[in-house]
Image: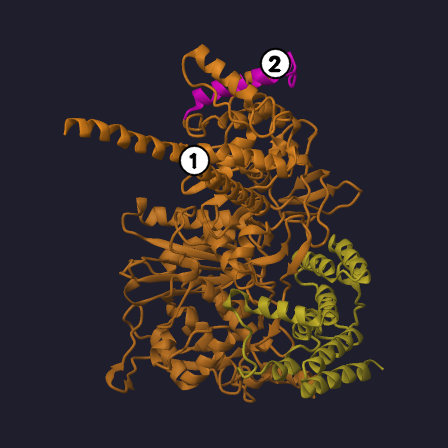
Chain colours: A yellow, B orange
Amino acid sequence: MVQGLVRLMLLAAMLAGCATTPTTGTGGSHGSSSSSSSSSSRPSGEPRQQPVDARADLQGSPALALLDRAEGARNQGNMSAAGRYLERALNMEPDSSWVYRQLARLRLEEGDAQSAEGLALRALRLAPYNPGYQAELWELVATARERQGDKEGARDARKRAQELRRGTA
Amino acid sequence: MAKKAKRAAPRRRKKKASARRWISGRFLAKVLAVGLVAMAAGLIYLDALVQERFDSHVWQLPARVYARPVELYPGRVLSRADMLKMLELMRYRQAPGAPTAGSYSVNGNQLIIHTRGFRDSDGGEPSQRLNLRLGGGEIAALQAGQGGSLARLEPMQIGSIHPGHSEDRVYVPLDRVPPLMIEMLLATEDQDFYEHHGVSLRGLARAMLANIKSGRLVQGGSTLTQQLVKNFWLTQDRTLLRKLVELPMAVLLELHYSKDQILEAYINEVYLGQDGARSIHGMGLGAQFYFGRPLEELEPHQLATLVGLLKGPSWYDPRRRPERSLKRRNTVLQVARQQGALSEEELHRFSKRGLEVVPRGESPLYAFPAFIDLVRRQLARDYPPEVLGVDGLRIHSTLDVLAQLAAEKALRDHLESKDPGGKNHLNGAVVVVAPTQGDVLAVVSNRRSREHGFNRALDAVRPIGSLVKPAVVLAALEQPKKYSLATIVNDEPLSVPLRNNEPWQPKNFDNKSLGPMPIHDVLVRSRNQALARLGMDVGLNKVAETLKTLGVQRDIPLYPSILLGSLGLTPFEVAMMYQPLATGGFSTPLRSITDVLDKDGQPIARYPITTEEVLPQEPVFVLQQAMQDVVDQGTGRGVRAKLPASVKVAGKTGTSDNFRDAWFAGFSANHLAVVWVGRDDNSPAGVSGSSGAVPVWAQLMASLPQRSLSQKPPAGVEWVWMDPSGTLVSGEGCDGARRYPMLPASIPEEADRCGSRDGDKKKGVLQWFKGWFD
């Protein structure tokens, strides 16, 4: 099962003759993300924490209905249906951090840690100012990196999560 | 002597006679035995042939490719004109109250749409009636079947993939064939179908009688089973051998398969015409080919036209021989009436209708060969041709029909104005992508977009010219301590010595050199000499590394000329390369397929979004700002003739040596498009990026709903007033001061005199930021 998924993922990556960039490339993704993806939308002046959940992030959006359906499908173990619902939601709300978060979690459950990491980092880019939420996303990144055998990257992500949590404590 | 001879003769005769007896006796019996054995062997062979081919042939279905389903929800940007265009393309019939699937009614901005329903990885969509209100260029309200406000139109079929290329099929199971069609079919072709055993003597007699009566050959007397045998196994030549094997094969077929199986195979196999090199087989494809609709949705007179075609697809071709076809159709309607399949009133009504065939070539099926080519290539990596050709896979693609049509039109319109009639062989290609998900929305590879052939979008490897410049600037910005957009570079002639070659001495587009200028202007005004100097300073290997990070997979030779785009890429590869620039540093493989389902709609495989952070967002944001100025003030400003200033987009022009290639690559938040214009023979085409490609890009982008690029700087980028030297912080209103987005490491510690107060404040903000990071 996992093997099949990994194979599928590899095939998808091969699609379009567009293999992912070699990790030896410039500005290795971990180094860069540690400086890039933090508190992306901190307003100048008094930082005010914004609540983050599906309702807050997607207020009144029809994508909410798709997130519900995705959750239902996921609970029934129908991962491909859940993925399809989430991608449809993303089509409607391409700037939603929450949809990326859901996709990242799903991908992690499916065993595709590499995609999960990328999606979680995107969720961080789009995240509203909420250290607790951001910390949770960094934990997700850490888990995804661990599963790929990237211990150093995972440690780095965990540290960022802790810092964010400490800040809120 | 004579006597002897006389005596000898009868003896010889006797001998001959006995030889003849021997032949007619034992020999004939032997021959007969051998013949019987051969016949039995032949029958066994035919029997095996019948079974093997029937079993496999029935399921020999090409993979079908569908566009992305149109998603309907309140707030979706969709003009009334586009909504109606989609419905027309999908052959929705206008009917009051939208009573049946595939129909709609429209009253001002209020629409009722009765969708057809489909299967998908998420279960799909039921056929249902939607109440839709349009307003302000978007869907204002939507009410779906179960009170939901979310629905999809079924995905439009845009093509099939089969290894043979010549045959195609839209498989329709018997229970979905309109009963009226079956009645018409049996009434006209084989009235004893349910009684005979493959061959009908009664039918033959009836046919002979009819032929004698009319004095010519009007009926063939072949049963449906015999016709199926002909279609299935035999060539169309009328040879004796064919006639000899046809009868036993028909009987064998009846022995092995039920009437319904034979009927279903017949309906899906029968030959109905020719579309160029493509044979039209089966009523399902016939319905699409002639009427642009699924078989289930045809009206009686249309079904009768298809049934009428069986007698001679080219003789009764409704497009080329409309009168003949109409007469034949009405005959079929009459026969149906005689059999009680139609009422007198219906006969009257449908006989009066026109043929109502759609013009050839207007069907969306096979309308987008360049995109289908991409799907075929991406599929071929995962599925061997024998699977693609037989399993009837359903491929859900990423094609956005409206984007595709807009891209085709933009290229066609512009090339027609530059090169009317194509006398100068000017051609082009367009690739449109949704950057955040990597979905390929449109591929155009020819100004005559329906024509197959050389896929310029995927295969034309052309020097990218100045499209490379953002990568050079990015390579610089990745060293923020050394470079920012404010850094001054000299636009002056330079000479780079080359091993075993003349020195490299690039010139500017206008043959002038403008002297010192900030990197920002180098990019916006596309200055070759200044950029070459910058690139040499940054280092060829660094530039090549950045190109690789952006997704360029070809070998990048470390010649200085790569700085000005001697590197050859296809339009599709350029889209890949610009994608991380559009997404703020994420690389997402471009996909043309989202899901693969089996012939019953059960999901087999998903191609999910994958993404990877390949670049830090700060330098990408800074670069994006400069690329926005390319459009607002620079070589790409022609875009603003079409696209309002409120829509923030970014891009870069490209022109190769001697005006051989004209490029524009650019993006909004939701569309990335690459346009190439040039000639196949690589001769000078007389077009620059600004004149040849920008207008196409602008028209295309203007006809799609665009979201502006975000102007909110990420943490770690701030707008700073800089003095003209690019080395000191300045202030608003100071002499020659300009404002740039800067990375913290790029912001000088020192301020000029005018800006010192302002600068202190800036530094204060900087300290505040640094506090957050440390």
Give the SS element for disc 1.
helix
Seen from the viewer's position, the closer of residues B225 and B770 is B225
Report the residue that reaches farthest toward the left.
Answer: B1
Residue B557 in the figure: left or right of residue B60: left
Which chain does tag 1 point to? B
- Compared with B155, B675 (above or below) is below
For residue A74, what is the image quadrant?
Answer: bottom right
Q: Which residue is mark 2?
A: B338
Tell me residue B38's x, y (percent).
Answer: 48, 42
Please tell me which residue is depicted at 27% across the width and 28% down the height of the picture.
B10
**Main SS of residues in magenta:** helix
Seen from the viewer's position, the closer of residues B84 and B14 is B14
Tell me residue B92's x, y (percent).
Answer: 61, 35
Q: Is residue A107 visible?
A: yes
- Compared with B31, B578 (above or below) is below
Q: Which residue is mark 1?
A: B28
Image marks 1 and 2: residues in contact by CB distance under 8 Å: no
Tell me residue A55's x, y (percent).
Answer: 80, 60
Range drawn in magenta: B321-347
Q: Amino acid at mark 1?
A: Leu
Tell me residue B359's x, y (percent).
Answer: 46, 33
The N terminus of chain B appears in which quarter of the rendering? top left
Which chain does tag 2 point to? B
Q: Amino acid at mark 2?
A: Gln
